[in-house]
Image (cartoon, rainbow, N blue to C red):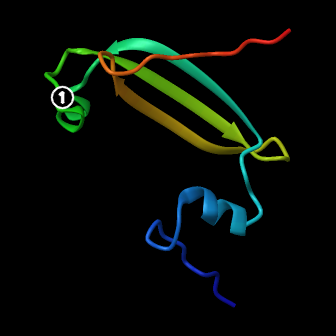
């Protein structure tokens, strides 16, 4: 029996994970200032070395198994981070 091959052409990553019974239920994310790498700068249409916000996220499924690791860069001149903190 062969497992169906899923690609992002057949749905989003989260759709694919849900069909496989593995959805993120907890994520830990860090945000820091960084300088755009040449690759990120080209994608963001800015000069290399310009400030960016770098997000690093690790998500876990209901069993506590790591499910997703993401590193993203956002233009430092276009985004604002808002957080609601509760006790």
What residue lies at 18% left-to-right and 28% top-to-bottom? 38
What residue lies at 17% left-to-right and 35% top-to-bottom? 42
Looking at the image, the residue that sits furthest to the bottom is: 1
**Left or right: 9 as drawn, with respect to 60:** left
Check disc 1: other Cα within 10 Å, few if <14, some if 14-19, many if 20+: some
Question: In the rendered view of the protein, which quadrant contains the C terminus?
Answer: top right
Q: Is residue 19 above or below residue 56?
A: below
Which of 32/5 is in front?
A: 32
Quarter where residue 13 is shown? bottom right
**Left or right: 36 as drawn, with respect to 74:** left
Q: Which residue is mark 1?
A: 38
Q: How many marks?
A: 1
Q: Is residue 8 above or below residue 74?
A: below
Residue 84 x %, y %: 69, 15
Which of 73/39 is in front?
A: 73
Which of 23/69 is in front?
A: 23
Question: In the rendered view of the protein, which quadrant contains the N terminus?
Answer: bottom right
Helix, strand or loop at label 1? It is helix
């Amino acid at each position: 029996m062969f497992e169906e091959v899923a690609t992002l052409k057949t749905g989003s990553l989260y759709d694919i994970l849900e069909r496989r019974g593995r959805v993120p239920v907890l994520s830990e994310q860090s945000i820091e200032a960084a300088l755009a790498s040449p690759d990120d700068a080209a994608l963001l249409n800015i000069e290399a070395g310009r400030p960016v916000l770098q997000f690093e996220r690790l998500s876990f499924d209901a069993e506590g198994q790591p499910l997703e690791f993401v590193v993203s860069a956002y233009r430092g001149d276009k985004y604002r981070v808002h957080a609601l903190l509760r006790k």
